[in-house]
Amino acid sequence: PGHRDAPVASVAHRWRMLQLACAADARLVPDDREIRRAQRLARPSWTVETLEEIRGELPGEPLVWVIGSDAYRGLMTWHRWTEVLALTHLVVLRRPGAPLELPEALATLTAERRVAALPDLPAGNVLVLDLPMRPVSSTAVRAALAAGAPTGDLLPADVSTYITDHHLYGARSDPGSIT
């Protein structure tokens, strides 16, 4: 993303890990359009461009972008962020016990667009869900890998193996224990 620090792992490694993570569930289909766009244009690929492209492929269909509450708090740093809700609904997944503390402009937008259930409309609403998720962030997983701590069930086995085999995030040892 253009609004965040550069990731530790290369695009190719992150793409492969996504493919491995999705392989176990046929309903999950990785999409490399943002990678291709960034390479073609030699600049960041913006979410709003991806949403415009998908909206063009699915005119009039409900589109839902699922995002974690930590990323949602930073929505105002996104390129053309004010256009996102014209293209999709946002489902915000809140970490267990974490308050949804938002900057004022985003709090106002959320209050105006927040719904208890998504209507059968193409876009425009915000649904905040408190799901029984593990209170673990990608930052914490990377830190555990770098420290050689066990990651147990935090990562799919194939992803753990890939990380270890490619020495990503400081990982070492075998993927079962990553010690």
Image (spheres, rainbow, N blue to C red):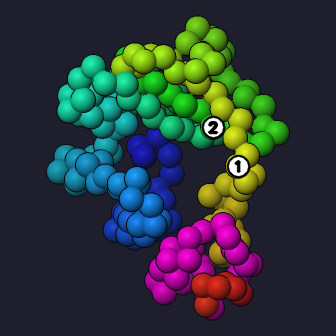
- Considering only order in the chain, which callout, 1 or 2, is on the residue closer to the N terminus? 2
Residue flagged by tag 1: what amino acid is it? Met
- SS for callout 1: loop
Residue 5, percent from left and from top: 51, 51
Residue at 20% of width from left, 28% of height from top? 56
Q: Above or below — where is 169 with respect to 131?
A: below
Report whether residue 42 is seen. no
The count of marks equals 2
Out of 40 and 100, give the one closest to the viewer: 100
Q: Provide the residue designation for mark 1.
A: 133
Looking at the image, the residue that sits furthest to the bottom is 173
| Magenta span contains residue 94 | no
Residue at 32% of width from left, 45% of height from top? 44
Residue at 42% of width from left, 18% of height from top? 120
Out of 38 and 124, give the one closest to the viewer: 124
- What span is colored magenta in the figure? 148-173
Q: Quadrant of residue 106?
A: top right
Q: Provide the residue designation for mark 2.
A: 93
| Magenta span contains residue 153 | yes
